[in-house]
Image (tube, helix red, strand yellow):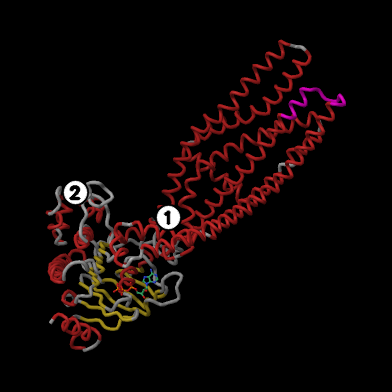
């Protein structure tokens, strides 16, 4: 009950924050509409007695009042609906934005590894659309409380025993609460199968994967798995739904018996002359209303309880996303690097796993150097890059930027000084210019800056082939959108990575894997030359991951990673002379190209 109450209070707070005037209007209208119903019953009783007594003037006035109250009962709810519906839309937007902020605006990305986080999101997405129900429930509850008080007073005046009628409304309420708990648990229990089924649906309906799915003839298998998971979800929800319905019916039965008792009591008292006909009409009318009030309360309570559950899940998401600061965040990145970046005894395991992906990595990336990381698939190269970008924190050890622990730099300020091109880059379906300009948001629409970045990335040819150049809309989501090849998308992503002009760290994690080796070689040749030129001004470190040794050999420093450990460091010449893993891998690739 406490959760429902605090949840309701928070829903009210959200509505107030969104638009307090509309909140007040909706509450007043709902309360007026709700109070009009028991008043209508009272005037109906008075009118009946006036008719029986032959007081035609009074009867007419009571009749007019009954009509006005009927109009108020029927119409005020509709006006309130207009007010809270708009509120609900705004509240939903507020909620969804909060969710997006939590999911993508947080410091690290550890939470994306957690299945419990993914399950929460699966439930929260659709639940955010229940704001209209929650607000309607909340505002109706205010009206309902008033209506119940009025009804109780009217009943007590006739016979205090009739007060048992509203009391009998408690079991259905409790049953309704229990039923909603059963449904809520079922939603949590089925979240994983729902999430996987939704992923399979996305896989099966995405244009990007259509070719591979056809070749491997996976469509039937995907459908089978999707159907199996969906059936499991439906079975879980259906069973819970049935159980909840039985619990609710039990509660309603108690009220039904009380309703019957009240009727018998009043009719007997009318027959023995203790009450008048108008009183019987009043009780019949009020009892029907109490019945409706009970049904409404059960559904209102379940809506409020459901929204309280949604807000609780949101709090859990907030906790999962929060990174507890081990050190005070009290430094800012320097304008230029003088010493460089040092890793001291860094260990790392991905959240929720026991496997150590990086072990005791100690390394110095000197300011101004071009550094290549090489190693076999799964060696830990990308993980190292992600740690340097501050996307994850080391489990042990530390990363120092010019002697300052990376954890002491505000994440957003550090990212501002990073430029990056990732292996799994995003295909932003914007205009070609903006797809590149995104790399430095203040210069999103700065055509000369975008053109310069494209030049550095050797990607001018992609733009030249597009009908409207930088203004060409990209992506198949748009009717007129141009679709690019994998390599063309990658070139634009590389241009995006080169938008920031004064980064302290430029990370290129296989951003050229879709380019041919020669193109990659030329690109890095140019890039390394440029990096050497600008190193004097910012001391920027260029860090790249590549499997192509023709590119790697150009680096000032080559770091060889094996099974999460740094096994060799040095320049090409030193490593070849050392005759270790690097020399072996280099030889293998050279042989393959002969
Ligand atoms: N998000 C993740 N959650 C759990 N384990 C992960 C995750 N990403 C990578 N790993 C594991 O960490 C190890 C290192 O992965 P990483 O991507 O750093 O390798 P890599 O050297 O960049 O490989 P590649 O050359 O194939 O890109 C692998 O064993 C991989 O299975």
| Mark 1, other Cα within 10 Å: few <14 / some 14–19 / many ≥20 | some
Q: Secondary structure at mark 2?
A: loop
Q: Which mark is residue 453?
A: none
Circle 2 residue: 472
Inspect the magenta stretch and tell me whether residue 274 lies in it.
yes
The residue at the point 66 percent across, 48 percent down is 248
Circle 1 residue: 102
Mark 2 and mark 1: span between their CA atoms?
A: 32 Å
Nearer to us of marks 2 and 1 is 2
Image quadrant in which you'd find residue 462: bottom left
The residue at the point 17 percent across, 57 percent down is 453
Q: Is residue 136 left or right of residue 375?
A: right
Where in the figure is residue 173, as x and y percent of width and height? 67, 45
Where in the figure is residue 545, as x and y percent of width and height? 25, 72
Q: Are marks 2 and 1 in contact (CB under 8 Å)?
A: no
Image quarter (top left, top right, bottom left or bottom right) of the C terminus: bottom left
Foreground residue among 272 and 326: 272
Q: Secondary structure at mark 1?
A: helix
Regarding residue 192, the answer to whether it shows in the image is yes
Looking at the image, residue 307 lies above or below residue 239: above
Where in the figure is residue 480, as x and y percent of width and height? 22, 46
Q: Is residue 4 left or right of residue 288?
A: left
């Amino acid at each position: 009950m406490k959760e429902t109450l605090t949840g309701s209070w928070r829903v009210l707070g959200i509505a107030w924050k969104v638009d307090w005037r509309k909140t007040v209007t909706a509450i007043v209208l709902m309360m007026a509409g709700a109070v009009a119903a028991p008043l209508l019953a009272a005037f109906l009783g008075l009118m009946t007695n006036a008719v029986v007594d032959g007081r035609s003037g009074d009867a007419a006035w009571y009749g007019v009042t009954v009509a006005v109250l009927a109009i108020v009962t029927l119409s005020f709810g509709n006006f309130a609906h207009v007010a809270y519906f708009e509120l609900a839309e705004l509240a939903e937007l507020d909620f969804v934005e909060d969710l997006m902020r939590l999911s993508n605006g947080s410091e690290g990305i550890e939470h994306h590894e957690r299945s419990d986080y993914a399950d929460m999101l699966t439930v929260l997405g659709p639940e955010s659309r229940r704001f209209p129900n929650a607000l309607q429930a909340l505002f109706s509850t205010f009206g309902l409380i008033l209506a119940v008080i009025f009804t109780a007073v009217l009943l007590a005046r006739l016979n205090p025993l009739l007060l048992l009628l509203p009391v009998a409304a408690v079991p259905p309420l409790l049953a309704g609460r229990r039923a909603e708990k059963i449904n809520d648990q079922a939603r949590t229990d089925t979240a994983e199968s729902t999430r996987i089924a939704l992923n399979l649906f996305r896989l099966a309906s995405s244009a990007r994967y259509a070719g591979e799915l056809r070749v491997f003839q996976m469509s039937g298998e995907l459908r089978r798995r999707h159907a199996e998971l969906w059936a499991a979800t439906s079975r879980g929800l259906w069973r819970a739904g049935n159980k909840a319905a039985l619990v609710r019916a039990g509660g309603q039965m108690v009220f039904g018996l009380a309703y019957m008792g009240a009727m018998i009591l009043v009719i007997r008292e009318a027959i023995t002359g203790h009450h008048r006909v108008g009183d019987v009409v009043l009780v019949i009318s009020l009892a029907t209303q109490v019945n409706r009030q009970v049904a409404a309360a059960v559904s209102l309570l379940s809506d409020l309880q459901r929204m309280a559950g949604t807000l609780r899940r949101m709090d859990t998401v907030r906790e999962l996303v929060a990174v507890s600061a081990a050190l005070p965040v009290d430094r800012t990145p320097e304008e230029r690097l003088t010493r460089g970046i040092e890793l001291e005894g860094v260990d790392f395991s991905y959240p929720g796993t026991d496997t150590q992906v990086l072990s005791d990595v100690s390394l110095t990336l000197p300011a101004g150097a071009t550094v290549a990381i090489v190693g076999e698939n799964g060696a830990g190269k990308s993980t190292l890059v992600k740690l340097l970008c501050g996307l994850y924190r080391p489990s042990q050890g530390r990363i120092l930027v010019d002697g300052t622990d990376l954890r002491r730099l505000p994440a957003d300020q550090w990212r501002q000084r990073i430029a990056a091109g990732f292996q799994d880059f995003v295909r932003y379906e914007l205009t070609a210019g903006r797809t590149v300009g995104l790399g430095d948001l203040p210069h999103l629409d700065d055509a000369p800056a975008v053109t310069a970045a494209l030049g550095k990335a050797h990607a001018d040819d992609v733009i030249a082939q597009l009908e409207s150049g930088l203004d060409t809309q990209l992506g198949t989501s748009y009717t007129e959108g141009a679709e690019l090849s994998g390599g063309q998308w990658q070139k634009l992503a590389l241009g995006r990575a080169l938008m920031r002009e004064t980064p302290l760290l430029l990370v290129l994690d296989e951003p050229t894997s879709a380019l041919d080796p020669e193109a990659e070689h030329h690109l890095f040749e140019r890039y390394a030359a440029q990096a050497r030129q600008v190193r004097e001004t910012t001391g920027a470190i260029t860090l790249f991951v590549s499997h192509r040794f023709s590119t790697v050999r150009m680096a000032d420093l080559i770091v060889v990673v094996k099974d999460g450990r740094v096994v060799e460091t040095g320049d090409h010449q030193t490593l070849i002379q050392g005759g270790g893993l690097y020399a072996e891998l280099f030889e293998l690739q050279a042989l393959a190209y002969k």
